Image (cartoon, rainbow, N blue to C red):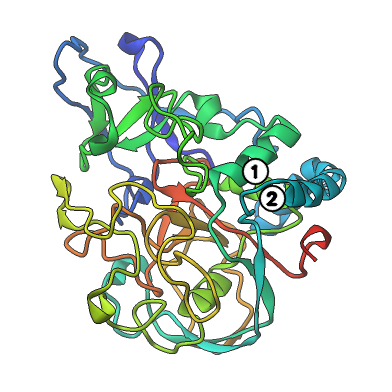
Amino acid sequence: MAAPRARSPDAGGFIFYLCPALIALSLGLNHAHEITEVPRPRSGCGCGSGSTSRPEAAGSLPEAASDSISLAKQAAVKYSREANVEAQKIAQDHRSHLKPRTNQMVLIPGGVFTMGTDDPEIPQDGEGPARKAHIKQFYMDIYEVTNAEFERFIKATDYITEAETFGDSFVFEGLLSDKVKSSISQAVAAAPWWLPVKEASWKHPEGPDSNITKRMDHPVVHISWHNAVAYCAWADKRLPTEAEWEYACRGGLENRLFPWGNKLHPKDQHYMNIWQGDFPHHNTADDGYANTAPVTSFLPNGYGLYNMAGNVWEWTLDWWTVHHTTDEVENPTGPASGKDKVKKGGSYMCHKSYCYRYRCAARSQNTPDSSASNLGFRCAADHLPDYLK
């Protein structure tokens, strides 16, 4: 379902869009928030606002279906042919490049785990109650999808992301150049550190004067749920369900806060890329990163998965709900329909003082067409794709 948008006639047709939960961009708010004028030097723009709905993006999925599986099938119809043809080329490419690929998957064994928690840190997010979930075995990407892997998809399909189609996406103010910031006159009222930036996209994460040349091994960002589903279909994969994602995140551990246990800094070491310091004013980057980190950073969890906490938010297949049964369930897939999609894992912007969502049980949501500079994904699969065997 399209997110509410407001068009600013005084800013050259700049389109700003809001997502429920403030795009939830690691903020965890639960309502759409107004965009308000923010004083900017030399901007000279007092922008009014109206409300329109997002048109369907060129290169995105056809008109949204009522459930996640149907949406994924639509993407598969559009991209699976390319995936089948391209698969062998990808395998050959893997042998011919010096740098190793990061599209590998690992088998996650089936089992039973406690999903959610009876001690929620953010109850309004629907972190509880704790409930037993049976999960059948599946495959999971070892790493978050990188800029390099996403670029292969773009070159093979000429796909256009929704951020590119709409012409803007949200970026954390602290990452922007003075030139870009001086051209922006509006922001999200409840979180003025989020700015809508023209031409921000996966290729230009901080706007037109940025690039990914030295970040090809970093997670791709500014990716909507629709974009992630399309990539997964092309790669003969899919998005993980929320239950699968959380089960994989826990790495075989039960009732632990993080993928490695309950201590934030075991042996005084950093295990993930999150915000250190005073949010949103100063990030000390004690973990080594003030922005995204390479997907191979930090230690893997018990299943061999990297960066399941922090770095970037990761989309899941499920529609969002805060109401869960306490009954024991098998391979849950969430509600049949909804307005928002579940994302997990937190990001490099998360800090305990305002967004304690880098825990395994934590969760947040965005509309399926939302994108931002801390939003990416990784894939799952029922069977290992042939080109990875």
Q: Is there a contact, CB below 8 Å, between mark 2 and mark 1?
A: yes
Q: Which of 141 and 198 is in front in this view?
A: 141
Q: Indicate the position of residue 264 as horizontal and vertical percent values.
A: 26, 75
| Relative image position of residue 172 (x, y in whole percent) | 29, 39
Structural distance between the alpha carbons of marks 2 and 1 = 7 Å
Q: Nearer the viewer, residue 373 or 337?
A: 373
Closest to the observer, 324 or 318? 318
Q: Residue at x 37, y 46 (%)?
A: 23
Which label was assigned to residue 71?
2
The residue type indicated by label 2 comes to: Leu
As displayed, is residue 201 above or below residue 28? above
Of the 4 image quadrants, the one containing the C terminus is: bottom right
Helix, strand or loop at label 2? It is helix
Residue that mark 1 sits on: 64
* Amino acid at circle 1: Ala
The residue depicted at 71 percent of the width and 58 percent of the height is 237
Question: Residue sitting at 49 percent across and 33 percent down?
Answer: 213
Marks 2, 1: nearer the viewer = 2
Mark 1 Cα-neighbour bin, 10 Å: few <14, some 14–19, many ≥20: some
> Which label sits on residue 261?
none
Looking at the picture, how far across and down is residue 366, in whole percent?
Answer: 44, 50
Number of marks in the image?
A: 2
Lower position in the chain sequence, tag 2 or tag 1: 1
276, above or below 150, in the image: below
74 or 313, nearer to the observer: 313
Q: Quadrant of residue 275?
A: bottom left
